[in-house]
Image (tube, grey):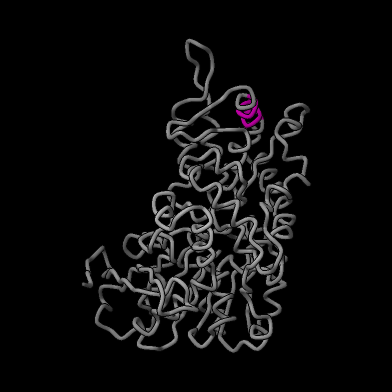
Amino acid sequence: MTLSYRQPGVVLTDRRFTVPLDHDHPGGETIELYAREVVASDKAHQDLPWLLYLQGGPGFGADRSVGRSGWLGRALKEYRVLLLDQRGTGHSTPANRQTLPLRGGPAEQADYLTRFRADSIVRDCEAIRAQVTGGAPWTVLGQSFGGFCLTTYLSLAPEGLATAVITGGLPSLDAHADDVYRAAFPRIERKVTAHYARYPQDAERARRIAGHLLTHDVVLPNGYRLTVEAFQSLGIVLGTGDGTHRLHYLLENAFVRTPQGFTLSDAFQEQAQGMLSYARHPLYALVHESIYGQDARPTAWSAERVRAEFPQFDAAKALAGDEPLLFTGESIHPWMFDCDPALRPLRETADLLAARTDWTTLYDPARLAANDVPVVAAVYHDDMYVDTAHSLRTARTIRGLRTWITDEFEHDGVRTGGQRVLDRLLALVRNEA
């Protein structure tokens, strides 16, 4: 049964699809995908071209928008939009600590999750396209990891694409996870330095919190064990448009005076657990490093290993001297599966994924070099999450790709810039800018 309903200015329709778990075995087990169709109320009965939106992540469901805000408002001027919950996210056969035991033990769970990468997502898109568009190619907007998926789409099934629009998501075609993180930690350090330049009072606040965590065992209300490394990982927000301000407001209310002395406030703990918990998107933690797996080398907890090459991120060493405490971000570490109650039951599964050596190839350089799909990419000048140099090197290998390089926005520019960003990219891909 298809259900349609309304929000201000839009008509929404829930869509559900059945696809193979393993597209190489179409007669085998199936999973269910969910997507939300959105169309402007005044265009609901018009025959419009389709735009498919692929969310960033991995592991996040599609945007839950209200009305015609942001980039969606621009898209609805000319498209009927499909917001897809990629497999394992949102309502699309979610993968988490509650559902994965249905697969069996950690080994079975790890085998299952190998089918939740970009190549499977692209084949899902192609499996449902005929039901949505009647077989016509569609425009695809890929944000962040969605752009990684769209690069795979251009490699595997370009015939399904009318136009490709990538925002903050041009991946390296051949970098191992180690290469990705060796490029990432210096970028993260720059973002932290910029944060302290904006909010110099936060340098001492961060040191004080870290010092407290090094000498106290702190468990947040949801059961999350707040170690100093976990506190540092709050720096993941520094790659977003408002992240530096969010971090500042968190730090300024960290301590409260009690009869037993100063301790971390309830307000700080409540806000911190919401920022740290992976309960809403556990797949991000489970498969994050696997999005860089393409050869016989295991990812082997790459971010944790590479971090050791950057001793300035060691909190104890920073506090022993007068160096600023550095936050981290956009990296997954094995200790997260010990700290976070939403991840603890999945630690062995994560270890098995980190040890795998049979990752499939995600990109086809030869096919990308012969590309004939109109494609444009926004590349953010000092993107904390996706290395700019890697993105530009890939851009040069995709025939006909046009880039918009900007420092006006951070990685989430399609959210913060909304209509302006999408308007600029659509004009660029149509040679109107």
Q: Is residue 171 left or right of residue 316?
A: left
What is the span of residues highlighted in magenta in the rendered image? 204-211
Instruction: Point out residue 215 in the picture as x, y percentages from the top left corner.
Output: 63, 22
Instruction: Point out residue 347 in the picture as x, y percentages from the top left corner.
Output: 55, 46
Quarter of the image with the N terminus in it: bottom left
Instruction: Point out residue 136 in the picture as x, y percentages from the top left corner.
Output: 41, 88
Q: Does 35 sit above or below residue 123?
A: above
Residue under the image location 48 percent in, 47 percent down? 278
Residue under the image location 35 percent in, 67 percent down? 34
Q: Does 279 sit above or below residue 314?
A: below
Q: Depth check: 43 or 269 in front? A: 269
- Report if residue 209 lies within the magenta region: yes
Q: Does 304 sit above or below residue 393?
A: above
- Report if residue 331 lies within the magenta region: no
Give the image quarter of residue 353.
bottom right
Q: Depth check: 350 or 401 in front? A: 350
Quarter of the image with the C terminus in it: bottom right
Q: Is residue 11 left or right of residue 169?
A: left
Residue 433 visible: no
Q: Depth check: 96 or 257 in front? A: 96
Residue under the image location 39 percent in, 88 percent down? 135
Residue under the image location 40 percent in, 79 percent down? 27
Q: Is residue 196 left or right of residue 143?
A: right
Residue 323 visible: yes
Q: Depth check: 215 or 80 in front? A: 215
Give the image quarter of residue 3.
bottom left
Q: Is residue 150 left or right of residue 298?
A: left
Circle count: 0
Q: Name the magenta segment's main secondary structure.
A: helix
Instruction: Point out residue 80 in the picture as x, y percentages from the top left corner.
Output: 35, 77
